[in-house]
Amino acid sequence: AALTRLPALRAGADGIDSPRLGELCADFGEHPDTLALLERALVEQPPLLTRDGGMIAAGFDAELDELRALSENADQFLVDLEAKERERTGLNLKLGYNRVTGYYIELTRAAAGTVPVHWHRRQTLKGVERYITPELKAFEDKVLSARERALAREKALYEGLLDALIAGLGPLQRLAAALAELDALTTLAERAGALDLACPELTDEPGIDIVAGRHPVVEQVSDAPFVPNDLRFDDSRRLLVITGPNMGGKSTYMRQTALIVLLAHIGSYVPAKSARIGPVDRIFTRIGAADDLASGRSTFMVEMTETANILHNATAGSLVLMDEIGRGTSTFDGLSLAWACAHRLAQIGACTLFATHYFELTRLPDEHAGIANVHLDAVEHGEGIVFLHALQDGPASRSYGLAVAALAGMPKPVVAAARRKLKELERVPARRAQLPAEPDPQLPLFAPEPNAVVEALSGIDPDSLSPREALAALYHLKSLLP
């Protein structure tokens, strides 16, 4: 079918000014002999499997046609034979076939005593007897042999056809490659128009600048309008710490970035208003959670293995997506690992999207010039929550875990108990919840500033002080208080 459409494809490409399209059309070549052979040899719709035959067209081989005719005319022969035997014997009989016994004449056991002597019993069943006659046996041998011979002949013809095509395999392979590339390009072109995609600018300068980027799949399947977001990586902005509630759009934002970069590098238009993409050597992802039961690896082990691969192989030219690193272990272990991974990626200089619920990591920009905070915000409305899905600079104002749990259908008593427990934890300084809006609610990830009072106390030996020295030390400590 593809060979018959080559002239139409050439005609459609003639008016298009594209050097690459001209090169593809040149690879089409001329294949009149191959086309004629295939049209004569194969049926219009060949079967997917060759083992049962049916792929060689009628008229291509006289021997195959004869064998097929013998097999195909079997039904009419059986109808005629059944009518003839009924008329000759006066018995109420019928002819049948199965793969176990072959062809047979079947009649009731009550009528079995009146069968002709030249009938031979083939099978006895409950209430019926099955017989074979010399004429039916000869027909059976002929038909079954014809079917087997037809299948063997068809397979031999098919193999001969393949041998004939192999002689011109080189041009056919070039044609197949050209058609495959043309198919991909036309599909990308159609999608570019249908989905309002933009032509990306590929540059030798490092960095990524996407304006109004979208996820090409999510925006098609979602009933709600998709909220586009910008992205900027440059020399001064290499790692973005992304905070925000679950379902806020963090993973979608990360995935759409990877898809836009990938589409740009394969030569496709991208789902964005504009995109300027610098060199990207590899795309690394650590998104999602799944264990590996077959290998005995836990979810956390899988996460750490993938993270280790990223840290060993990422370069300054890589795009890295890291989602919720450290969530599979204790809070302090997970927080420490997440901080160390972000610190290492900042040193490497890879363009990194680092989504996290550890609000302590929002202090990383104070330690590294190339790190910035962004968040996908949400607002609470009554007892519900509204996800805005719009990316904004800075860290998220708070966590909405309990609101998301309520939205997911968590029993109200459980949510209420969680809120009470949260307030209890907030009253314990060492275990306060991670709410940046509160005064210093973070765990002490970074070393605190030295305290003058503590330092002064650490240098005092109470046992060696006289009463006057003790009083002087007390006044000194008081003067150090803010």
Image (tube, rainbow, N blue to C red):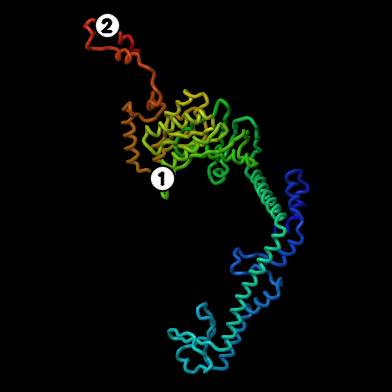
Q: Amino acid at mark 2?
A: Ala
Q: Residue furthest top?
A: 468
Alpha carbon separation for disc pair 1 and 2: 63 Å
Residue underneath mark 2: 472
The answer to whether residue 282 is visible is: yes
Q: Residues within 10 Å of mark 2 (few under 14, many from 20)?
A: few
* In front: label 1 or label 2: 1
Residue 266 position within the rendered picture, expressed as x and y whole percent measured from the top left: 63, 42
Q: Is residue 172 left or right of residue 224?
A: right
Q: Residue at x 52, y 94 (%)?
A: 117
**Looking at the figure, which quarter contains the N terminus?**
bottom right
Q: Is residue 201 above or below residue 449?
A: below
From the viewer's perspective, tell me whether residue 403 is left or right of residue 159.
Answer: left
Q: Circle 1 sits in a helix, a strand or a loop, which is it? A: loop
- For image coordinates 50% across by 29% down, the residue present is 346
Quarter of the figure with residue 71: bottom right
Quick check: 377 above or below 219? above
| x and y, in percent, of residue 432 in the image | 35, 29
Q: Quadrant of the C terminus?
A: top left
Disc 1 marks a residue whose amino acid type is Arg
Q: How many numbered callouts? A: 2
**How far across and down, in percent of the image, does residue 366 sit?**
47, 23
Q: Quadrant of residue 261?
A: top right
Residue 189 placement (x, y as % from top left): 67, 45
Task: Please tell me which of labels 1 and 2 falls first in the chain.
Answer: 1
Callout 1 crowding tier (Cα within 10 Å): few <14, some 14–19, many ≥20 = some
Under circle 2, the secondary element is helix
Q: Nearer the viewer, residue 219 or 57?
A: 57
Rendered image quadrant of residue 318: top right
Return the residue at label 1: 297
